[in-house]
Image (tube, rainbow, N blue to C red):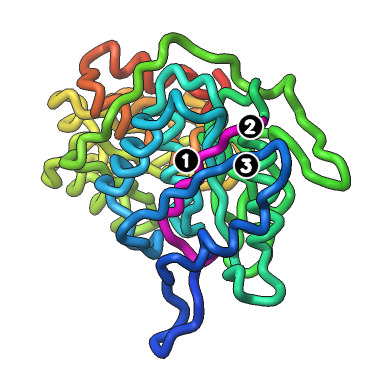
Amino acid sequence: MSRILVLYTGGTIGMDHTPEGLAPVPGLLPRLLQRFARPGLEFDIVEFEQLIDSSALTPRQWNQILDALVSRYHDYDGFVVIHGTDTMAYTAGVLAFALRGLAKPVVLTGAQLPLVHPRSDGWSNLADALEAACQPDLNEVAIAFDRLLLRGSRARKLDVERFAGFNSPNAEPLAEFAIHAHWRKERWLKPDGEWNPLRIDENLKLAALMLTPGHGSALAGQALRDGGLDGAVLLAYGSGNAPADPVLLDGIAAMTARGCPVLTLTQAPSGAVEVGAYAASQPLARAGALPGAELTPEAALAKLQALLSAGMSGEELRKQLVRPLRGEMTV
């Protein structure tokens, strides 16, 4: 017997048609979920009081999810978080880093079409998420979507039209669901340390800044220098290249001097930052930016959010940002 807690936060999957268009309908999804009742599976459903379209997500909702999970952690064998797809990868990243010492499965899922639609992908996504949440040796945060189980700290939303909305460009799936579930257990994380979850500092100011030809580098530099940021992600070209724009480099140096980290990522969907592969990658590093390897933007922001929320600073913060903590990068 597996006891699973299902947290319903909102999203397309539980929406219905209203005069204003598709919108969350309280009570609808818990009723529909009774279809999954079967011998050997016992699940409870907690429907959040305010169901949100995930495009309206804020750190306050992350703490709501964390509080709901942490307060019931010892009462269940696994957890399913039903979430809107727009920001699901951000939430998966935050949970992966905030649930320190996690030794149970936490599986996020949602849908491109609501369950009330005759072609909804939500039914298969929910079935796969519940099955994954019953795996006793899955000790990490994952996303179940379109017959794949993806590491939460690696997943990205890559398609708004097809049912294959998510993938993890730099990491193989944790499982594939066909007639039989193919569990790729050799890829699963081991429990890491004692259970010691943290809450997110809702007042942190973080930003992702993308370089563009022309004025883009100077504008990014101004935001770094004058934006009052606690940390930032800089989306550079190729394997971490950028123009040696004095305004950009001054902005990075100003952040570094304040002890506020800047992580360099690549704008490319696949691949990694590699300082030194090109001369154009050197100025960012010399100014103080940290190479983010193959971190996704979502995971990079989540990692910053969690480590800064934990009160980490100085050299220890810089060390933790460039080493893998929850399978988010390969170094």
Considering only vertical position in the picture, is 113 above or below 261?
below
For label 1, the crowd category at 10 Å Cα-Cα, with few meaning under 14, some 14 to 19 and many 20 or more, is: many
Q: Amino acid at mark 1?
A: Ala
The residue under label 2 is 2
Q: Which residues are magenta?
A: 1-13
For badge 2, the amino acid type reads Ser
Q: Is residue 269 left or right of residue 148?
A: left
Mark 3 or 2: the one toward you: 2
The residue to which callout 1 is attached is 92
Q: CA distance from mark 3 to mark 2?
A: 28 Å
Residue 81 lies, in percent from the top left, at 49, 46
* N-terminal label among 2 and 1: 2
Q: Is residue 270 above or below residue 160?
A: above
Q: Earlier in the sequence, mark 3 or mark 1?
A: 1
Please tell me which residue is depicted at 50% across the width and 23% down the height of the picture.
Answer: 326
Front-lying residue, 13 or 27: 27
Observer-nearest residue: 187 or 262? Answer: 187
Q: Secondary structure at mark 1?
A: helix
Residue 168 tag number: 3
Disc 3 secondary structure class: loop
Q: Residues within 10 Å of mark 3 (few under 14, many from 20)?
A: many
SS of the residue under disc 2: strand
* Amino acid type assigned to the residue bearing label 3 in the image: Ser
Q: Earlier in the sequence, mark 3 or mark 2?
A: 2
- Alpha-carbon distance for marks 3 and 1? 12 Å
Residue 98 among magenta residues: no
| Disc 2 to disc 1, C-alpha distance | 22 Å
Left or right: where 323 falls relative to 145: left
Residue 154 appears in the picture as rendered: no
Residue drawn at x 65%, y 33% is 134
